[in-house]
Image: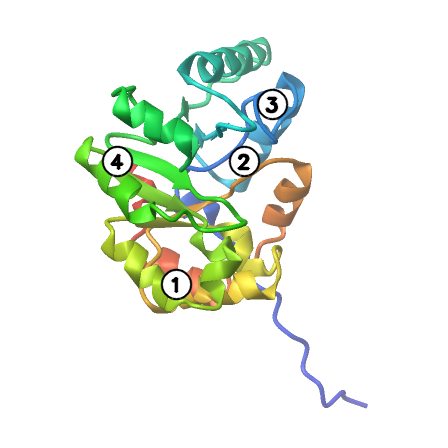
Amino acid sequence: MFSIFRKRKPAEPFPFELLGTDMHSHILPGIDDGSPDPETSLMLVKGLLDLGYQKLTATPHVMEDMFRNNKRTIQEAYNNLQIKMAEEGMEVPIRYAAEYLLDGNVDSMLAKKVPLLTLKDSFVLVEISFVNPPMYLREVLFEIQMKGYQPVFAHPERYFFYQSKPQQYADIRDMGCLFQCNLLSFSGYYGQPVRQAAEYLVKHDMVDFLGTDLHHEKHLQALRELPLTPPLAQLVHEKGLMNTRL
């Protein structure tokens, strides 16, 4: 007897190789809430390569009250990773930049004309507090641009105070920001409100970059299982994402 129910076709896996570069990850050892040591960093790097990425950009947090990183601390962590990779005979194109929380530290760096670490060229990755949006967001973004940088707003879909008022995304775009969404946001990994916000951004043509925001092995496993959902298919096959420019 034949079943009246058709088997669902397995979801197509996400084609990471089409992005080329992962431009948001926390794979440098021991300097933020990502990889704790070179051994873990090596495992995460291998995992990203296995997914299909050809180039990686590490973006450790720079936060005034938690991760007080600067070019020296980031360079040291990068060197430690390079040493570990050399021991394994690995040659992988890895750059380092930073993910800057828009706080007093960034204000000070801009005032003192301390160079920001960029993804490439003038692209600089920024984030804001998950608790409250900064009162002076427009002003600090303007100052970043006046210093010659192009701000890339990290994971806008994850801020709950924008999810309920999605029209504010257009306001931030008008402030001169490009948007980077997390791949796992489209799978529901962070919850349905985040997924819905990510899909809203795709629908309104506001996604410029996709990143893993990889911190640990759990993220890596979720990325291995990431399906090519219709919004993601639209981004990689129709949008022309900017990852390939990095």
Closer to the eye: label 2 or 4: 4
- Coordinates of residue 246 in the picture (x, y in percent): 31, 35
Closer to the eye: label 2 or 1: 1
Separation (CA) of disc 2 from disc 3? 10 Å
Amino acid type at mark 1: Leu
Kind of residue sitting beneath label 2: Leu
Marks 4/3 in contact by CB < 8 Å: the verdict is no
Mark in front: 4 vs 3: 4
Disc 3/disc 1 C-alpha distance (Å)? 33 Å
Position of residue 66 in the picture relative to residue 121 (left or right): right
The secondary structure type at the circle numbered 2 is helix
Q: Which mark is residue 48?
A: 2
Q: CA distance from mark 2 to mark 1?
A: 25 Å
Q: Residue at x 33, y 67 (%)?
A: 204
Which dot, 3 or 1, sits closer to the camera? 1
How far, Cα to Cα, is label 4 from label 1? 23 Å
Whole-angstrom CA distance, mark 4 to mark 3, is 33 Å
- Residue visible at 66% across and 19% down in the picture: 39
Residue 56 sits in which quadrant?
top left
The amino acid type, in three-letter code, at marker 4 is Ile
Cβ atoms at labels 4 and 1 below 8 Å apart? no
Q: Is residue 192 above or below residue 131?
A: below
Task: Please name the residue shown 27% across and 25% down the image.
Answer: 111
Identify residue for label 1: 201
Residue at disc 1, secondary structure: helix
